[in-house]
Amino acid sequence: MNRGIQSFVIGALVAAAIFVGPSGVGTAAPAAAAVSTSTSTTTSTTTSTTIATRSLTLVFNNVLESAAVLLTNTKRALAGCRPLRINTDLRQAARNHSRRMAQAGVMSHQLPGEMRLGRRITASGYTGWTRVAENIAAGFNTAPRVMSAWWASYSHHRNIADCSLREIGIGVVWTGRRMYWTQDFGRR
């Protein structure tokens, strides 16, 4: 894909993440599933609907995460810092933590039975690090809203504007209408 088209697609996805909340993603079963008279057709339609809904959710989560990275790097530029690079291991650690928070219905840096941040990051595959940091949030349904809250908070702002950090992974998960966000930062 050429760079112009790629930039346009990324811009469109970011715009979608900024202006469409999780309520914009269809989670109700389509009417066709309810109308079906055959058990096998209903099962097939329900399975297809579930797969399509999960796929759409994954795409939407990726868009939200990408928008949050873009906004994080915009804030870092204001602070005179270099942009952060997305790291897949940090992203996986962030997604796992957001998923755990969503399952527990609790916002916490360390849930019962969970490893501390450094061990979680290392377990996700991000090894050889010299510094890690984390921001978490719950209840914000767009990337700009969560970034505004983080930027307004001293400790979260400090992590975002820490110019010594070089990489980032963001994970967003929602359960019902409540979204859980994790920003994991690192430097190797």
Image (cartoon, grey):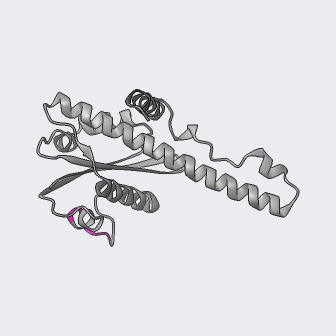
Q: Is residue 122 visible?
A: yes
Residue 123, located in which quarter of the rendered image? bottom left
| Residue range corresponding to the magenta coloring | 114-118
Residue 166, position as x, y percentages in the image:
18, 46
Magenta segment includes 116: yes
Magenta segment includes 90: no
Residue 143, located in which quarter of the rendered image? top left
Magenta portion: prevailing SS class: loop
- Residue 144 position (above or below residue 180): above
Residue 147, position as x, y percentages in the image:
31, 36
Residue 86, position as x, y percentages in the image:
29, 47
The count of marks equals 0
Residue that appears at 78% across and 45% down: 31
Relative horizontal placement of residue 188, taking residue 123 as reference (left or right):
left
Residue found at the far bottom of this picture: 113
Rendered-image quadrant of the N terminus: top left
Residue that appears at 42% across and 58% down: 99
Residue 97, located in which quarter of the rendered image? bottom left
- Residue 21 position (above or below residue 47): above
Residue 82, position as x, y percentages in the image:
16, 36
- Residue 107 position (above or below residue 61): below
Rendered-image quadrant of the C terminus: bottom left
Residue that appears at 32% across and 35% down: 70
